[in-house]
Image (spheres, rainbow, N blue to C red):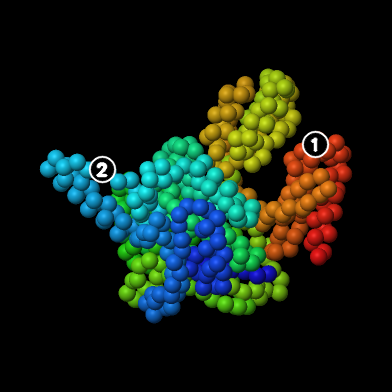
Amino acid sequence: MRIAYLECFSGISGDMFLGALVDAGVSPQLLEKTVSALGVRAKLEISRVNRSGISATKVDVWVDGQKDMPREEFWAKQDAARAHAHHENDHSHPHEHSHHETSHRGTTAPHKHEHSHRGLVEIKQIISSADISDSAKKTAISIFEALGAAEARIHNVPIDEVHFHEVGAVDAIVDIVCAAVGAEALGVDEIICSPLNVGGGSVKCAHGTFPVPAPATLELLKDAPVYTSGVQAELVTPTGAALIKTLARRFAAFPEMKIEKSAYGAGSRDFQGHPNVLRLVIGDSASSKLAIHTATETVSVLEANLDDLNPQVFGYVMDRLLEEGALDAFAMPVQMKKNRPGTLLTVLCKPEDASTLTELIFAETTTLGVRRRDELRQTLARRWEQVRTPWGEVRIKIASMNGIVTNYAPEYEDCRRIAAEHHVPLKTVMQEAARLYLKEEKH
């Protein structure tokens, strides 16, 4: 089993992760091609730098000819610009307020207004239209959804109303999509992460000055092991936290492994006596008997007892729940009070979707109460592949454990659509898709 271990003794940010990937052998041309595919007027600058005696790879994003900058420098310039504008206004000179895009590390450059407040829908459209693999698109979107969910909780707004003040800029989109593409190109079965050094002190954000970690970072680091070494700086950025939350399968001390290579990605700042780098170690698991490694995540469980709901409405409610983001929805017959037969509706969902789905249950059913609890669930690693049948393409969902495929299944909706369009029995389409997948696996 091929594994990658991220040592976050100086935290993690998007640029540090990209630097570590390139240092580990991910093709710079692949990342440059990815940036070009996004069509966002950006380019990468890749260089070798020294961080307290450690040689590391630095990746910077240039947007419209301007380079990103550390968050502290960005906000210092913002404050200076505001002070200058206020002074100009006091002297009755006409002026314009420039709009800025800010990224996960405070990067900024003056751009058009429409870029300064990117919503999740717009970002998804940019990623979905890019010429990259479907799995990389899914990963990149998941990272942004994690960021959006954190912001939504902090500001108490629906996720679709979140505007990414700190992560909506072009350079952040570049970092996240390149991270998804690069992680896939790394060719490992599992990414493991060390405890995270979050740093200390305070950091200035779009909504004011906060202690480190910043609010979005803190939200994203729930259930993650963290500490501070005393360095008075923000070491884990919101994007860095979202990358770990999405890409890392588990947290652990240095794993038992046969080391193949080590790589270093540099952060923007150079601290005296503290190498500001992210170390990435790649190799094969040395365990003769591997433990079963699965991803652990928190899900919300919603339940409601129904004894007077029209069965026709019930089917509609199930469809609506799944359309609105439920991970699963199912029903069981139960015997309720006064010996009345009823139905127990159970919905599994992401915690950030629980409130929306609870409102839907109240609006569409006759229940007077919805129970909610959060539970941990373990999931196998999953990915998608496509096979081309005589009637069209079908996605295959593949589950693996410790790098070994344990289950595979043709996507039902693809097969159902093809069966209806070509008047072919559904079971025939599903059997042919499975046969083609096995044939490709043998080759």
In percent of width and height, residue 228 lies at: 39, 64
Q: Is residue 88 left or right of residue 309?
A: left
Judge by depth and name the residue closer to the eye, 279 or 136.
136
| Horizontal side of residue 211 vs 5, given as left or right | left
The quadrant the N terminus occupies is bottom right
Q: Amino acid at mark 1?
A: Glu
Q: Residues within 10 Å of mark 2 (few under 14, many from 20)?
A: few
Viewer can see residue 234: no
Residue at 50 percent across and 69 percent down: it is 20
- The Cα–Cα distance between marks 1 and 2, rounded to whole angstroms, is 57 Å
Image point 51% across, 58% down: which residue?
35
Numbered circles on residues, count: 2
Residue indicated by mark 1: 421
Viewer-closest of 343 and 186: 186
Q: Residue at x 58, y 28 (%)?
A: 360
What crowding class fits label 1: few (fewer than 14 Cα within 10 Å), some (14-19), or many (20 or more)?
Answer: few
Q: Is residue 429 visible?
A: yes
Query: Which residue carries the number 2 mark?
Result: 96
